[in-house]
Image (cartoon, helix red, strand yellow):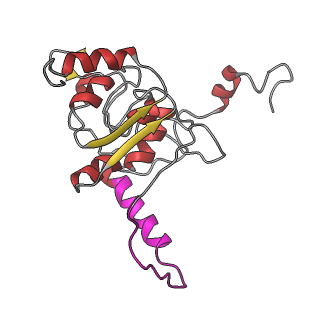
Amino acid sequence: MLEPSVELHSPRRRESLLPLYPASRPPGEDRPEFWRASGQRTLAELLAPTVPIVVDAPAKNVILFVGDGMGVSTTYAADRQVVDSASSATALFTGVKTRFRTVGVSSRALPKDCDSVAGNEVKSFLHRAQEKGLATGLVTTTRITHATPAAAYAHSANRDWENKTIKTNRSVCKSIARQLVEDEPGKNLTLSSWTSTTLTIVLEASIPKNACP
């Protein structure tokens, strides 16, 4: 029972009521292969109905709408019961659960640890589509470097490294904006309703002056 004097709906109280880790953690869930195999099993179950479904032709186009923070659907992060945009979008776009506030990496990458990113990157479905020669696009009503859209193309140990490149003795972690410009070829469309000074600066620094007439 809660003490009568405790405000149940205060953020501080809610945080204390929630476990930091999920109740049960299956062995091997820190490996991307674990989540991909789990997803394949789920798809196999959903695509094997008792009544056969007749498909005239495979889908030519796929549009995924993400209502960030909307609805009752929920998931959990690899290290917390309640997720943020970074970990939930990574799970949604890559099929792999990750740690709180990390983007496009498996849970073997540690928050704010640049050295732990290399080798633990996970590919989004947009990246996989590009590898097959398909046209892809990303449209958002928030800034393009925000954690939710960033999970579609970036790999970062901290969602806040939107315009900050981290350098250590062993590693260099590009900012999320620089990754969008330099590391993700093949995008056919990228639209955002926010004006990003950060992205403009990165574009000006990355595009040769004689590239445009």
Magenta stretch in the rendered image: 34-60
Please say if 149 is above or below 210. Answer: below
Q: Residue at x 52, y 47 (%)?
A: 65
Q: Position of residue 12 (x, y in %)?
A: 67, 20
Q: Position of residue 146 (x, y in %)?
A: 44, 27
Q: Residue at x 81, y 33 (%)?
A: 1
Residue 171 is one of the magenta-drawn residues: no
Q: Residue at x 63, y 26 (%)?
A: 15
Please say if 129 is above or below 208. Answer: below
Please state the total of marks drawn on the protein image.
Answer: 0
Q: Position of residue 48 (x, y in %)?
A: 47, 78
Q: Quadrant of residue 204?
A: top left
Quarter holding the C terminus is top left
Q: Residue at x 37, y 26 (%)?
A: 111
Q: Nearer the viewer, residue 152 or 22?
A: 152
- Residue that lies at the very extreme toward the bottom in this rendered image: 51
Residue 54 is one of the magenta-drawn residues: yes
- Residue that lies at the very extreme toward the front in this rendered image: 213
Q: Quadrant of residue 176?
A: top left
Q: Nearer the viewer, residue 76 or 172?
A: 172
In this picture, residue 152 sits left or right of residue 85: left
In this picture, residue 88 sits left or right of residue 119: right
Q: Position of residue 72 (x, y in %)?
A: 66, 46
- Residue that lies at the very extreme toward the right in this rendered image: 4
Q: Is residue 201 visible?
A: yes
Q: Is residue 165 visible?
A: no
Q: Nearer the viewer, residue 188 or 72?
A: 188
